[in-house]
Structures are given as structure tokens and as C-alpha cells.
Amino acid sequence: KRLSMDTRAGRKLQRLLMVKGTESALLFLLLCCSGTDMAAASSNRGKSQSSPWTVVKDVGDWNILGPWAFLGPFSIGKTEIDGDPVEAHGGIRNLTRQKNKVFFSELVQGGKAGWTKLKTQNGVVALSFPLGERANVDFNKVIQSISKMSGLEFQGWLVSDFIVEHGGHFSLLCTGAHHVEVDNHRLLHGDVYSTGWARSTLALEQGKHTIFIRVRSKASATIACSVRRVSEREVSIHRPSSSVPDIVGGRLTSGLLSLPVANLGSSWKKIRVRVSRSEVPRQALSSWARGKKFLPVVTQEAPGEEGVWVAPGQTLMMQASFKLGGAPGSGDLDPSWADSAPGDGSCLDAWLRAEADELQDDGNMVTTAVSEDLKVGFRCRVPSQSFIFTFLDHDGSVAQAAAVRPWNAEECEAKGGCGVLLSLSGVGVQANDQADSHKYKKGGSDFVFGFQDAWILAPERDGAHNWEGTGYNCAVKSLAALQHLVSQLESMQGFSVDTRRVLFAGHSRGGHGAWMMGMHHPDRAVGVVSLSGWWKREEYADANILFDLDHQLSSLQPQLKMIFEACIADHDSSHLAGNLLGLPVMIRTGSEDMSVPPWHSRRMARILQEKGVKVTFNELPGKAHWWWDTEKESDGGAMNDAQLRKFYSKLSQPLPAFGKRMEAVVYNPSTHSGRGGIRILQQVVPYRRSLVDIQVEEEEEGRTWLLVGTVNVLRLTLCREFGRWTRNASAVRLVLDGQEIEQQVLSRMMEEEGKGKGAREEEEETGFCSMSTSLLRENNEWKVVETDGWIRSQRSVVNYGPMRQTFASPFLIVVGTQTQDQNISQRLLEIGIFLSTGHAMASRSFSPIVNDSMLSDAMAEKHNLILVGGVRYNSWAARAASAWSERDKERGGGGGGGNFPEVNNQTSWSVRVGRCSFSSPNNGAIFTFPRAVQNSRAPRLDAHITGGSIDAMEAAVRYSFASNVPLTRAPLSNMFPDYFVTSESFRWKGYGGVLAAGFWSNRWEFMAEAGFVDC
């Protein structure tokens, strides 16, 4: 109606109608009526936008999206999951952007929030309040009025329309956003960590599209979203996620490297990382490398490696394995080539590229894409310097650590191995810097690094771990990695390492990590040093506070709230303080520390003193969070001054003798390796506090009585460290809850410890403890169980949850394909990509995806599985359900247990938890369950993602992120129990919309004492 046919625009519209049809004419009409000319609507990076939407061009750079409409702000808590108040009004997709529409909000002056129009400036849309009438927020007034800093937290929605000039394949990059929705694509990942490589890919038709971003932040937020057309065969490679391993003594410390590689195309690709070339830097050829005839080259460790399948739109932390070799015709590599290389800067460069193969119609694999080359540089270090090495972590990902060798090899040989100072870093501190912080100047000389008779080991795993979960497991694994490295590297021969004698230390975040390591592994601890550390992440200022001003609190039942809090009880150092009885502990802080206030250190000092722990507390006047000079210049400062060096010297001594009284406080048997050589294998009620209290009585003739009382302990065993009781005793007697255990039973358990395991990894996982013989409490009496058959059908230290334990071993994300509906298949794949990229961003995890039809039995045996789609759509989930239903035929060692939770037949679907059955299309469910494998006595721990509809599955996984970006965890890796079932109101009410949650019993049944159901 607005266009007259005698105008130029009208005549163009007529031609489009006749030649190209209605779709092209409607697109032109839409643009014309908005006053936007297609040719003028190209990307304007660095300028504010006056157009009502962005037009995505076929050529050129990224197209910045905007302008935006913002709905909010609304209050929200710090908890990783919280409800969305917009869902109470029908959800963001069902709301029109009416300026006068009012939504009540605690944050806005006058209480009435609504829509606000925003432009992009310099490519960014900024939420900096106040923002007009409907976003008129004075945060200073808010926090003063309620006396809570958590009042700064807000949430809302950003919405923008954009036009695609011609349909095709596109890449979307949204920096500062956790996840993004475009049209019906509801689980596209944002780049919340600003990596630059966390992009989503999607197919878009010609015409108008809408992007939705749920914003969650503190006081303000900046989001930058852009989109560009990409080739359907494009792949890209990005900077390594971990440090590049060093060359020490002319040899690579390790050949592993992890790099983000993105499949930006529209089909599955098998991708591998190759070395295209390597060379010594040119400036070196005119200095230290001048005249050297034989210089090394970097080559592929396994040149025939086929690569890894990468899903369309997935970014995978690809692993590459390298080695140093001699140049062609030079023979073996002479390690002296690097003797005169400088210790800093690159002494050898390599160029890497990603190559992608695709399956053709004729069944052949053809290379269809090659990325641009990426240059990485290797440092050359002399053996006496700190050096970086990489290693395969607990979950199959590549982690890194820095180490400093002891000065004296003879000392290591004399002791049967030098002990280890495990030094844990604060946020943002690199592993190499952490290791080198243990230095001081002796007189006017150069810095002295390290120790005469102790190794320094500084592990690091990128991402948000707080030395809990992924970070904790990485620290444990690094000890075994160091031991392996020392045995393999020529320049480390003679400097043997004793990883059962460790002093746990750390600064800031690492101070909390020192608590975690010492309290979970007290039997291998020489001592614990916590420097300016916090005692509990959730109590560290207002950064991570839980369940305070949360939207979900108005509907979250207290019993259910306790389930989610129990998931992280294992991380509360104040609860575990008694585990340090018998160990020397030092706490230090600065009186002026405003980063981690001394209150945290003072609190832990008080708690430890009350427990009877021998603790030294020192609050240094005038010192802040970090310092280099304690009493004089460069004397070692916050990490290595004279007081600390004296404490570290305990590594020169044997492990401290067991005390007259000790205890083990355990919330999760999977993470606690025992105390006094006694380890809990099973709890009566899982994830409740268990206690082993040890009192020692000695007789004149040298006999020692161990009087052990237990609380919430069902099964326990003896570990290698139990033998330490016999060092100064002629005989040891164990009295367990008033019942003396026969001496021959103790002898048999100690003889069997460490035998028959067949794999170093399993020894490490079980803590060198006897699993073939255990002590089981039945009817208030302890009996001997001389079989490990129970492990095959019951929970053990290998597969206790909660859900994050699924990611504590190498894992695969398995996407269901058992449907003819392409929309369902695509959305299931998007769930898999969302989970994979979430773990890649948050933990730099190797998180491959496979279709259920691609997964072989051999591959499945080596991995825990994240099964997406449930028994209806995922053949491996269906296999798990079928196998569990047959379990009663082989109950070796006392099997039994509950029913498989998910039920599906031709007419109905449901998930059963206890007395409740949930069968609505609006119910989503995620639960862990065991899967028996051929070559292991312990079942694998899988996670099943299912629901009454794809919408319900998406809702169950997509709302897991925090406004504290540095501590945004990977999906399903923090406050998630063994199982939970969501309702239709989950999007609105958060945890308040959960219908069932809890922890399975030891026989994988619902247990009322450890669970919650609402039906």
C-alpha cells in the first residue's frame, strides 16, 4: 500500500514478483518499507547503527548485529542455575516488543521494567544502567537499601533482527554471551570467555531472522555479536590452549599439544593436525646456532594417524603429538645442539595446520579443507631451569605443568626419591611463573631457584576449576605425570622422585587448592601451606555466593535445596579440617590483603586449632595480596621467604608419624584416598558426612591398638600406608567399632594390596588399596568379604558420582540418530555440540562427539559416555537399558539394584524415580548410571540426557552458567547430583522447577534419605 507502482521502487518490486517470485519480492518490500537500502546496509565496524537491522552480506568481514531491544533488568542469584521471570509471561519468543508493556522488577526504580532500544557502539552493545525509563536502575541505591552486594546481579534478554541477503552457511560469534538462540536454534554457544574461537555455525535461509541472548551479569554487561558467511568446507585452527612443552637438554619434555580446531562446515569431517614445516628462527642462525651443521626438525609422532571426527559447528580441543628428529641425512639427533640456546624465547618454530577429510558418495575419504598455518615456538631450557611439560590428564585432555629439578641427584638417590612441593597457582598465574616464584636472592648474587633435595611441581589446567573437580583431578594426575617424565627424560636421570611424599602449597586460589589436596590426601602429605587462600569458593566475597536473592528461592523447597548444596560439600575445607590432624600446617596472609581478606585465613586457623591440628598462623603487617620482599629485597616474598623455606625443608624428612588421634571426614569416597591407611569404599547414605575416628593406644611390649569408630561407613579397606603403623610397633591390632579384626585378615589385606590390578592407572585410582578383600558392615557387625565381585554391580570409589564424576575419566558425547525426523536429529546434535564446546571453553577439555551408529564397542569400553536422546533416539541408551534389565542373571558378588530409570515402549515414555513416574512431554531428565565393560571389574559411569520432548531435553542442559565469568563451570560439572528431573516450569523457576533430584544408593536404587521426589 505504501508503494506506488509508478515509483522506481514499485517497478523493481513488479520485476521481482515476475522473475524471482514472492520470497525475493517480500524481502525487498521489507527493506524498502523500513527505509533501508540493501546496498547501504553492509557491515559498519566501529560505527553506531542507525538501520533497524543488520543485513548479512555475501562477502566481506564479520557483520555486526544490532540494534537491539533489551527486556529487563530482573534480579538473579549467583547460583549457576536460576529461573527466568520472562518465562512466567510466556517466554521471550512469545512477547511482542511493545514499549508500554510493563514487567515488575525489584531492581528498577518504580518497580516497572520493560523494553529498551539500544544501539551498538564500536561493535558492542553496552548495558550500563540507567538505560531510560524501563531500565532505570541505580545499583548503588539497590545495594545500600538491602545491604547486599549480590543486589548487583541482574538478568534480561537482548533481541535483534537481521536480514540474510542470500541463504547459506554462516558462523556466529557472540563475545560475552554464554549461549545464543537464533530462530529455532536454541542451543548455540556464545564466547563467554572471549576466546575468539568459540563460534557457532548454522544454516540460514534468505530473509529475516531473530537472535535472542539471555544476559546474566553484575552491574553492567557488554555483548558483541557478529555473523559472516563461511564455506561449507571451512576449518580453522587457533592458538594452543596449553603452554607449548619445552626442550630440555636438547630433548622435548613431552610431545603433546592441544589446539582448538573448528569445523565451520555443514558436514562431519575427520580432522588431523599436521606439521607443515619447522625451522630454527632466523636470528638464531646468526647467533647461537651459527655454524651448527645438524639442527633438529619437528615431526609427527604418529604420521599415519587418521584424525578425529568433528561435528559440523563443533570446536574440538584437538591433540597433536610431536617429536624432535634430526634433519634428513643427519642421523640421530645430537642433544648438544641446544647447549648454547637462550632460555627464553623460541629456539625452534613449527607451523601446524588442520587437514579435514570428508566421506564421499563412493565411500572414499578425500581431503576437502586445509586451514591456514599456525606458528608455535618451543623454548630451549637447561636442566637446572624451570621447564614446562604437557601430559594426558585424567579425562584424556592435555594439561600442563612446570617443574624445577632438585640441585642434588645424590640426595634423591639416598632418599629413594626426592619429595615434591606441589605448588598451586592463583587465577591467571601461568604454571611457569608459579614454579619460578620459589626463588630468592642470597646476598648480592643472582636468584636461587628451587631446592637442594625436592622437586617443585606447578600444574595448571585452563578454565574455571578452583582446584576442585577438574583442577583437583589435574593436580593429582600431575604427580604421576612427573614421575613418568623423570623416568623417561635423559637429563633427569638420577633425580628420582617420590610422589608419595608431597608438601601441598598454594597462593590465593591455590591456597584453597592446598586445603583440597591436603585434606583429601593426608597420608601422602609432609605438610600443608595455604597462602592468602580462601576456605570455600561460595564464601569468597560476593563472587560465588549461593541462594541469595535468587529468583528461584520463592519456589525452591528446602529439602531439594539441600540436595544441590550436598553436591559441593566435598569442597568445603572447614568441614574437612580434621583430616589434617597429625600434620604440620602453615597459614600466612597479609594484613592489607583486599583480594582475599585475612578473614579467610584467620577463620581456618581458628577451626584447625579447635580440631587440635598443629597450625602456624602468621599475618604480616602492611602486606597485601602479593609481595616479593618480606623483610629485605628479593628475599622470596609471599611464596619463598626464609620462614617458608624453613617449612618447606620438611620435604627433606620422612613422612610424619601417624598421631595418637586422627580422623577422616569424607563426603565422597571417590576423592578421598584414606587416613592412617584406612579408606572408605562405600557409605551407608551416599554424600552425607562419613567419619573414621582413629584413637591410638600403645602397650609397653610395643603392641599398638588402633581403636577406630565409624559413622555412615558401610565398607572400608586397607591401603599401602597402613603398613606405616608397623614401623615402630611389634604388632598392630585393629578394633573397629568395638570389634577386633583378626590379625590374619589384616595380614591378608596388606599382602593383597597392590596385587592383581594389572594397570598403573587402576592402582592410582584406588589409592594403592586392597579391593579384593574388604570389610563390610552388616547388622552392626563387620565381616570380611574376600571377593571383588560386588564392584561389578555396586558403587565403588571408581564410579561414585555426582554427575561431574562422569567427566573425571575420558568421555565421549554420543548423539542419538534413531529417528527419521531431520529436525530432531539436528537438535540432538546441537545439544551435543553445546555440551562439547562448553567443556572446551570452561576446562579446555577434549570432548569428542560421535553418532551412536559410529560408536564401536572397543571405543566405548575406554570412555564414559554422555548419551544424548534417551532410549527412543539413542541406540546406546537403549542398549544400556536392555543390559541392566538382564543384570539379575549374573549377580556376581551380590548384585541386585533398582530398575533402569527410563522406560520407553511403543505407546509411552517415562522416567521412574522411587514411587514417582514422570511422563509429560515437558519433563526433562539427566541421570548417571553404570555400564558394564569387558576389560574392567568396575562399570563405567555414563550420563543419560533424555526427556518427553526435545524442548524438555534442551531446557535441562541450557541454563547452567554463572555471571562470574572466570568461574563459569562446564555444563553438568558442579551442582548436579546423580539424577534430576525437570518440569515445564524449570525455565521459569530454576531449581524450583525440579521434580526429582538426589543420589543413587550403592545398588543404584532410589534412596529416600539421599533423594527428593515431588509427585
Image (cartoon, rainbow, N blue to C red):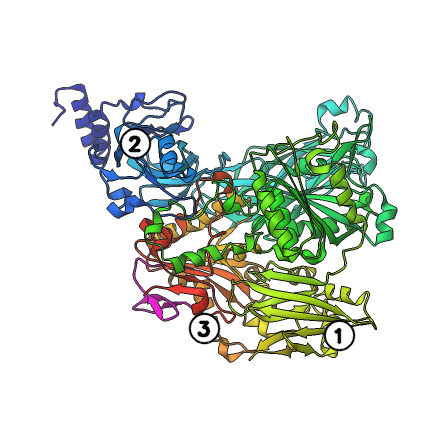
Name the spot of residue 350 as percent of width and height, x first: 66, 34
Name the spot of residue 726 as percent of width and height, x first: 79, 67
Q: Please name whichever residue, 1012 or 92, is drawn nearer the observer in this view of the structure.
A: 1012
Contact (Cβ within 8 Å) of mark 1 with mark 3: no
What crowding class fits label 2: few (fewer than 14 Cα within 10 Å), some (14-19), or many (20 or more)? many
Q: Is residue 854 visible?
A: no
Contact (Cβ within 8 Å) of mark 2 with mark 3: no
Q: Can residue 440 be seen in this view?
A: yes
Position of residue 397 relative to residue 911, above or below, is above
Q: How many marks?
A: 3
Write down the quadrant of residue 725 in the picture: bottom right
Position of residue 982 relative to residue 284, above or below, is below
The boundaries of the magenta stretch are: 901-926
- What is the distance, in whole Å, between disc 1 and disc 2 at their CAs? 72 Å
- Please, what is the three-letter code of the amino acid marked with disc 3? Gly
Q: Which of marks 1 and 3 is nearer the N terminus?
A: 1
- Please, what is the three-letter code of the amino acid marked with disc 1? Ser
- Mark 2 = which residue? 135
Residue 991 in magenta stretch: no
Name the spot of residue 776 as percent of width and height, x first: 60, 75
- Mark 3 = which residue? 898
Q: Please name whichever residue, 288 or 866, is drawn nearer the observer in this view of the structure.
A: 866
- Please, what is the three-letter code of the amino acid marked with disc 2? Ala
* Residue 747, numbered circle: 1
Q: Quadrant of the N terminus?
A: top left
Element class at badge 2:
helix
Q: Earlier in the sequence, mark 2 or mark 3?
A: 2
* Residue 757, numbered circle: none
